[in-house]
Image: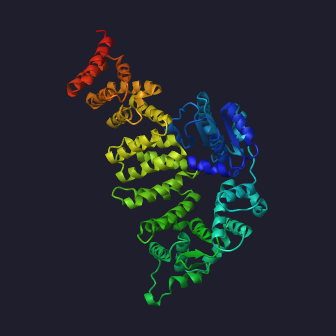
Amino acid sequence: MPNYLKWLEERFIEPEGYFEAVHLLLKEHAILLAGAPGSGRTSTGQMMLHRLRNITGPIRQLSFVSADLDDQDLEPLSRDRVLIDVSGISSELFPSILMRLESVRSKVAQQQGFLVAVVSDENQAFLEGDLARLVVHIGRPAGTEVLLKHLNKDGVPATLAQVSRPDFPGIPMRSISRIARLVHIARAQGSGGIKEWISRAFEAYAGDAQGVVEKVADLAAMDRALLLAAAMLSGARADAVYEAGEALHETMHLPPDDRPLLGRPGLSVRLGELKVASINKHGRVMFDTLGFDAAVRSHFWADHHGLRDKLREWVARLVESPALTASERDAVIVRFAEQVLNLGRYDDLLRLCAGWTAAGSSPQRWPDAVRALQLALEDSRCSGLIRHRIITWAQEPNLPFERGQVLVEVCSDVLARIDALSALVRLRHLARQDDPRTSSAAREALARMMGEGPWFARQLLTRVVRRLESLHPPRNADYQLFLWLTAPDRDYPLVSASDMRPLLVEGWRALMDRANQELWERAIHRWFSAVADGVVAEETLGILLDASAESAPSLTKLYVAAMRCRRDIESGLVLDLVTRFCQKIDALQGL
């Protein structure tokens, strides 16, 4: 997220209503951004929160998918920044989320945090009271100015006159970066000037759907398979396109070509007959018209409903093929994700990820699963659903080690950039897994997050302690996670943070009351050793005394644990330390 926000700020143009919205946000700590679809409401909300001064902690982006929000159990810390996009919720469902939205607004305001909620114009009629007075309508920035800023920042010199076009007003803000990328491609493909590159980019963006329909209608099944293979691997080596075409032929159970191999036309001839693509001098298959490959992919997925399951099988087969390079596999995954996400077929992506991370799956497929989940998480249309699936997997009692490794990487490297707390919650579940390989990897990821600041440590400790105190009996993994998190010899020992002390006392109170003494007694030894070695101050032992002060059984257990520590550790410093500690226990017991 930080890198993206820096990238966005360099290209951002404040829309009409922006400064009014900032003023209201600073005054009320919450606003509801309304505007027409494609006006850049989400990016505007991100920039408003990003530009707030003297604010620590990441920007949290929440989804109002039911299970996702319940799981995060939002309790903002002081001056938390929260972005919620509810603009995609239908008018039928919008009234049902108003209580949640008001609850989040109230909690953020109580903690002096800042909330930006993105709403649609059509749902403003449902807003009442405090929510209604917090609405600010933003306009749409001039698309020409936004594109010009994109191009100039990316090293393409241009003027406002050169990028101006009559069809700009209807293009959503989120599409500007795609058009800028198409301008780069057009520039790299050959001659011409900026106006020609922009013209070709806009033609590619619009897509030649009718041209694809007419082209496909005249092709036999074998040639259609080659066309789709070339589109899926546009820019790849000719060998990869050939393999992809053969794989699609077999996946679709097309009739075999009975001609002898020497009697069949070569790939360059077959591509030439399609009249839309060819093999360039570098041995790569390129389409003649910019964007035609994308139009071909969209046609087959959108228009051929009965092929979609088979196309998913084909993509799985391509990704697993040793004939493809890493960059070619990545292109296949990105292009497949684009199609299924556009159609709302999110489960197609999840089914591939499940297969690539099943028990016994090859480690070579794990990066592919990470990439697929990344693409889904970064798509606002399904991010909440994907988060929910991830936490469902993370909570499975017999989670395959392979899937656990992938989920740890996705949470720490992808989800943490979108919503750090959402990542932390899922990593906590993974850290509770029985397989030590998964739990260790998750703990290492949590340690890295905690090293970024106290915000993460407090959020994690709060949730760990709450689990120890819950009505449902904690598992040993919950106790072990607490002991790991609060170990006094960590690089950033929480026991030395005064603001963490109340949580530490609560956790130790629950631990001594509910856990087997043998489990936590070993941790007591580490505490005494850390104090004796000068790692933490002797005052930190007061956490243990405060945790047991109101419970005679806990004081007795703590006394016994301390005396065993005195017996087991041959150190004069520890002996003196334990003696003073036991005297304090005696005083609490009135002895």
Work out whether 60 lies above or below 363. above
Q: Quadrant of residue 463?
A: top left
Count of all numbered marks drawn on residues in the image: 0
Q: Nearer the viewer, residue 63 or 288?
A: 288
Q: Is residue 395 visible?
A: no
Work out whether 310 lies above or below 490. below
Residue shown at 64%/50% (left/top)? Answer: 8
Residue 369 screen position, x and y as percent? 45, 57
For this orientation, the residue located farthest to the top is 590
Residue 67 screen position, x and y as percent? 50, 42
Q: Is residue 147 visible?
A: yes
The type of colouring in the image is rainbow
Work out whether 293 lies above or below 103. below
Q: Nearer the viewer, residue 24 or 531?
A: 531
Answer left or right for 504 relative to 214.
left
Q: Nearer the viewer, residue 351 or 580?
A: 580
- Please state, as top left, top right, bottom left or bottom right, where the C terminus lies in the image: top left
Answer left or right for 387 relative to 113.
left
Answer left or right for 440 relative to 343.
left
Residue 409 screen position, x and y as percent? 44, 50
Work out whether 17 lies above or below 106. below
Residue 174 screen position, x and y as percent? 66, 54
Q: Quadrant of residue 537?
A: top left
Q: Nearer the viewer, residue 508 or 69?
A: 508
